[in-house]
């Protein structure tokens, strides 16, 4: 009679272990950053808990004057903010790659047109004097937004739809 209970307990434990083994957004982000823009890999993160199950994880990046911020509610990603100083990157195309990096991470795959979507948003922002421009991306079920200041510091956000 005890055998079914033992089996159920083992099944529950293996389910929890499998869920814990799934990579987080930050893990997937770092894996993609290694390939696309190594300077944007995280070097250290700190999570701050808030009321109502909210949390903010801020990560320093290898590039100077760069920051990745992950907002979550009840352990579910609620938004991503990437601050990038374009003057500190190896080349100008890395800003588009940074936006593509967020989309690729949200999609969970390297397949698709993540770089083209990011480039479209950057072009739209540039045409508006670097004011915020956004584009919905059905493949990642998210909205990518970009803005910049006069010094070339870009604010790239990704929010679930």
Image: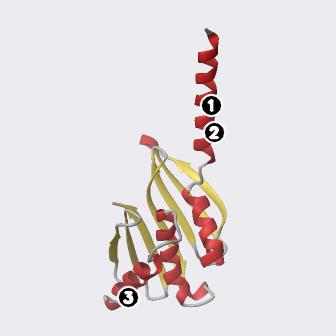
Evaluate if marks 1 and 2 touch, with contact meaning CB atoms under 8 Å apart. yes
Which labelled disc corresponds to residue 17?
2
Residue 60: tell me if it is visible: no
Which labelled disc corresponds to residue 70?
none
Which labelled disc corresponds to residue 13?
1
Mark 1, other Cα within 10 Å: few <14 / some 14–19 / many ≥20: few
Q: Determine the CA span between mark 1 and mark 2.
A: 6 Å
Q: Considering the numbered disc 3 on the image, is that residue within a helix, a strand or a loop?
A: helix
What percent of the width, then of the height, locates residue 71? 47, 56
Q: In this view, does 5 lie above or below 17?
A: above
Q: State which quadrant residue 43 falls in.
A: bottom right
Evaluate if marks 1 and 3 touch, with contact meaning CB atoms under 8 Å apart. no
Q: Residue furthest top?
A: 1
What percent of the width, then of the height, locates residue 19? 57, 43
* Tag 3 residue: 123
Q: Left of 58 or right of it: where is 53?
A: left
Quadrant holding the C terminus: bottom left
Q: Nearer the viewer, residue 37 or 79?
A: 37
Mark 2, other Cα within 10 Å: few <14 / some 14–19 / many ≥20: few
First reached walking from the N terminus: tag 3 or tag 2: 2
Count of labels shown?
A: 3
Q: Considering the numbered disc 1 on the image, is that residue within a helix, a strand or a loop?
A: helix
Q: Is residue 56 above or below residue 17?
A: below
Q: Determine the CA span between mark 3 and mark 2.
A: 44 Å
Residue 57: tell me if it is visible: yes
Residue shown at 47%/63% (left/top)?
A: 106
First reached walking from the N terminus: tag 1 or tag 3: 1
Q: Nearer the viewer's eye, disc 1 or disc 3?
A: 1
Q: Left of 63 or right of it: where is 57?
A: left
Q: Considering the numbered disc 2 on the image, is that residue within a helix, a strand or a loop?
A: helix
């Amino acid at each position: 009679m005890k055998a079914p209970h033992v089996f159920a307990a083992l099944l529950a434990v293996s389910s929890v272990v499998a869920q814990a083994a799934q990579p987080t957004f930050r893990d997937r982000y770092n894996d993609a950053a290694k390939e696309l823009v190594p300077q944007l890999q995280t070097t250290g993160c700190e999570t701050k808990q808030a009321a109502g199950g909210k949390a903010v994880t801020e990560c320093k990046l290898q590039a100077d004057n760069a920051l990745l911020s992950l907002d979550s509610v009840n352990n579910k990603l609620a938004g991503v903010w990437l601050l990038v100083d374009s003057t500190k990157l190896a080349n100008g195309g890395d800003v588009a790659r940074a936006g593509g990096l967020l989309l690729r991470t949200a999609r969970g795959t390297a397949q698709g047109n993540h770089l083209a979507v990011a480039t479209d948003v950057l072009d739209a922002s540039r045409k508006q004097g670097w004011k915020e421009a956004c584009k919905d991306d059905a493949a990642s079920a998210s909205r990518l937004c970009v803005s910049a200041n006069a010094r070339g510091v870009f604010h790239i956000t990704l929010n679930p739809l």
